[in-house]
Image (spheres, rainbow, N blue to C red):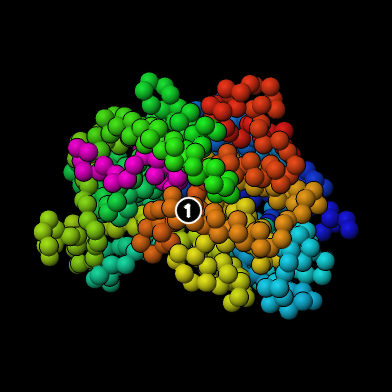
Amino acid sequence: MDHRAKRVAIVGAGTSGLAACKHLLARGFRPVVFEAGESVGGQWTRTLASTRLQSPAAVYRYSDFPWPDSAGAFPLHDQVADYLASYARRFGVDACVRFRSRVVAAEYVGAEPEGAADRWQRWNGNGEAFGDGTGAWRLTVRHGGIGEQEAETHEFDFLILCIGRFSGVPNIPAAFPGPEAFRGRVLHSMELSDMADADAAALVKGKRVAVVGAGKSAFEIAAECAEANGAGTPCTMVCRNPQWLLHRADVWGGVSIGYLYMNRFAELMVPRPGAGAASRILAALLSPLSWLISAATGAYYRKAIPMREHGMEPGHGFARSVSSCILSMLPDGFYDKVREGSVVFARSRSFGFCHDGLVLDGAGAGDKRVVPADVVVLATGFRGDEKLKDMFASPRVKGIIAGTGSPDAAVPLYRECVHPRIPQMAVVGHAEGLNNIYSSEMTAKWVARLLDGAFRLPVVRRMEESCAEWGRYYLRRSGGGGEGQRPWRPCLGAVNVWYNDELCRDMGCDPRRKRAKGQGILAEWFQPYGAVDYADIH
């Protein structure tokens, strides 16, 4: 079978979609990329004016495409968008993209009935990307802008979803009374990010703004409101569970947190899924050291950032944030704005709306207090699993992706990429990392080799056992889903090197990348791993 003649569709031209297309092109495929927007770059083309890269540019990069010399340590969003566009041009990805093309439905059609997958011994019947060649994905695509969309159907032999977790379906927390009781405007952070910069600035200028949330986007929105209005009309941040937001990515005068959490030795302190009983025993023996590193790192940031002074100290340890992928960087000078009164914090377990703003919990049982507001912005995250599920026409596939409706169901993707019971489909970029472009590119390389026939997947039973073990790991280590979301997050933050090891073994590559390049045993165990270490894997 000539794999390269097969039709491959990629949905999304963000960081993961660009990587998937690039590596397929390198192996002779000619994929079609459907992108709902008008340019490559995904969410980086629809952000707040002040949004910066959260990871240092030196590590947030594709393995074989460095940043230009003009990029700073933490580039602005437009610089990131330019970097992604340059990557697309350099490797011919932009020629494969169909812009303003939104995939609204995907349906698998084949000779076998849909339920045949439940009887598989091997994924896709034979463990290969295209199975026996009789099945296809039928995509319904709407082309054009709002009001001028035309629907077309296309069939492909393989489908790669690169739709991310941070867009599309907003997570709207329950509020009682609801927003209908409020006289002002309520919007999700997604709507604010989609606005032109001038329109977003005009919306908040001179307004009393309340931002609900405690993550990166909430802090960025509050910072922009503070910049626009000052202490005369302060922005109120309504937070339930404060998170770790850092002023810099190193501690104690220059030790990168990568040396503490992103190398092989650090991962020995984590019971890695699939590594067996020896990993669990070793992690237990090293747990005092793990606790000490987390406590010392947390103590450094508590001293350097006045989070405790303003009631924003996280209730969980620093290591928990690493394993949950909920570390972010503070906007420049954020706590200066808090000190001058431009930003005010309000802690509350729940909230509701009233005519003039938000109703929050008071100090005592049954007490209430009102935060006056003209505009309420819900910076409460997204429901990535819902967006993935909504893509499919089949109720069976919807149920599989949703984990059969149970919030505690195991993560359904093998290698965070393919489902054991869904044929000819992969998902790239669904699992998070402390550096998403790094983890997505490795998955894209794995998918490209799978499609090129470089390896076959194991029996379904083994795949499902692996899925279940990773699911149990997430439930133990990756909390913080938020209200209305699952209690775990598919986060590779504390085990990214181990995850890449598994991908390397599948692809037939030496997972010990530093040793293979002659860097020595100390570098292999104690230096941080990053995208550049895998640059020679194509």
Question: Where 454 falls versus 107 (above or below)?
Answer: above
- Looking at the rendered image, the quarter that the N terminus falls into is bottom right
Q: Which residue is located at x 57 percent, y 47 percent?
A: 276
Q: Which residue is mark 1?
A: 474
Q: Is residue 37 in view?
A: no
Q: What span is in magenta?
A: 308-331
Question: Where 134 falls versus 333 (above or below)?
Answer: below
User: Nearest the camera: 277 or 359?
Assistant: 277
Residue 311 painted magenta: yes
- Graded by Cα atoms within 10 Å as few (under 14), some (14 to 19) or many (20 or more), the crowding at tag 1 reads many
Q: Which residue is located at x 41 percent, y 27 percent?
A: 250
- Residue 298 lies left or right of residue 402; in this view the side is left
Residue 131 sits in quarter: bottom right
Q: Which residue is located at x 44 percent, y 66 percent?
A: 407
- Residue 138 lies left or right of residue 247; in this view the side is right
The residue most toward the right is 1
- Looking at the rendered image, the quarter that the C terminus falls into is top right
The percent coordinates of residue 224 (x first, y second) are 33, 43
- Residue 454 lies left or right of residue 492; in this view the side is right
Q: Which residue is located at x 23 percent, y 66 percent?
A: 353
The percent coordinates of residue 242 (x first, y second) are 30, 47
The percent coordinates of residue 179 (x first, y second) are 28, 68
- Provide the major secondary structure of the magenta segment: loop
User: Nearest the camera: 63 or 510?
Assistant: 510
Residue 196 painted magenta: no
The percent coordinates of residue 300 (x first, y second) are 31, 29
Q: Is residue 135 in view?
A: yes
Secondary structure beneath disc 1? helix
